[in-house]
Amino acid sequence: MSLALASAALAAWIYLLFGRGGFWRASERDDAGAPPDPAEWPEVVAVVPARNEADVVAAAITSLRNQDYPGALRIILVDDASDDGTAEVAGAARGVHPLEVIAGASLAEGWTGKLWAQSQGVRAAGAPEYLWFTDADVFHRSGALRALVARAEGGGLMLTSLMVRLTVRTGAERLLIPAFVFFFQMLFPFAWVNDPARRPAAAAGGCMLVRREALEAAGGLMAIRGEIIDDCALGRLMKRQGPIWLGLTKRSQSLRPYASLGEIARMVARSAYAQLGYSPLALSETVIGMAILFAVPPLLALFAHGPARWLALATWLIMALAFQPILKLYRLWGLWGAALPLAGSLYGAFTLWSAFLTWRGRGGEWKGRLQGSIG
């Protein structure tokens, strides 16, 4: 049994290395092969949904208002029933590009909160060529939008999205945040997302530049109004309209820290079971698969004997090496790769917790709202 499990884990990792779009290389990045500036810079409206973000929104909005963008740029912040002064703090942020702060209407039936707020921003935006969906806790360097638009225009992209750099200051963040990015790429290999001939589609919600006419042709945000994982739903919607692009970046940085293991667990549990379609069968398959990938190799390496131990050690080394490009991106010590099995096992536990919360009627909770559903 030990030898069979060790062989299965090794075979699975060999497939991931060579048959999953080279996701682990982390090579789809916005600083690689940047296209030239367009002849004319199109109008862009940034739409920022915000719910109780007073601690970070000033820095985020200031970064938007001070973008080094040669074309017309407006920022619309939709205050989604905040009770911490988010609108006032955002309105006081200074910068060059104009800002409009609007009070969001009460949540409409059938909508998730973020998408409802974004939809109101879209209505207020008018008819720009691009809509820039970004979060109220993301700081963008001054050239971020310029690079996004150049890539979108150069590639005729319907959607251009960046996985913003997340914070890795605490021990919990160092253990779990780079692993989160690694697993996201494993689930949605960016090279496949960016290939019009392949089916996989995804986006990262912190930074998404959308061609407005293509969004309207796809049915607008109304078409995905009830989606918990709204960014990936938007990616699927827009890929039906034409090519999309998803990559890693250092130009945009999340301002939201995750100080503890519990905070990261809640972040993952909000949407993990929704990603599985609320399917008990998919949940079982996922947990078993993650156990084989991440728990089996270190356990057998430590407690098995003979060939099973050596195969398990080789598998553990392979996964640690595959993790190195992401660790390098986050400027973390390479030996954190040895902890990837622990991170993977914890994410498996978070997925189970996500299902448990949904079964208890607490699924999809975000800032006081319950948005999950099994129906």
Image (spheres, rainbow, N blue to C red):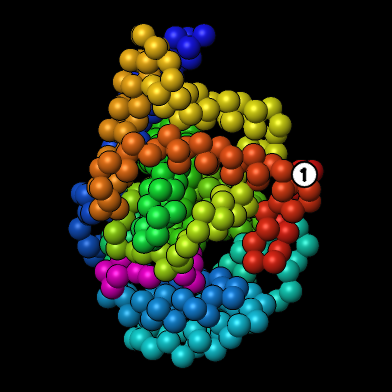
As drawn, 32 above or below 39: above
Residue 25: % across, % down: 28, 37
Residue 263: % across, % down: 55, 58
Q: Which residue is drawn at 25% across and 43% down?
A: 334
Residue sitting nearer the eye, 6 or 232:
6
Q: In this view, does 20 lie to the left or right of 88?
A: left
Residue sitting nearer the eye, 195 or 311:
311
Q: In which quarter of the image is the C terminus?
A: top right
The magenta stretch is 130-145
As drawn, 327 above or below 260: above
Q: Is residue 168 left or right of residue 224?
A: left
Q: Which residue is drawn at 38% across and 70% down?
A: 139
Residue sitting nearer the eye, 6 or 365:
6
Q: Is residue 278 left or right of residue 47?
A: right
User: Which residue corresponds to mark 1?
Assistant: 359
Q: How crowded is mark 1: few (under 14 residues within 10 Å), some or many (20 or more)?
A: some
Residue 271: % across, % down: 61, 49
As drawn, 250 above or below 69: above
As drawn, 370 above or below 180: below
Q: Which residue is drawn at 45% across and 38% down?
A: 342
Residue type pointed to by label 1: Trp
Residue sitting nearer the eye, 77 or 340:
340
Residue 235: % across, % down: 50, 48
Q: Please, what secondary structure does the residue beneath circle 1 have?
A: helix
- Name the quadrant containing residue 369: bottom right
Q: Does the magenta stretch include residue 140?
A: yes
Q: Does the magenta stretch include residue 295?
A: no
Can residue 268 be seen in this snapshot?
Answer: yes
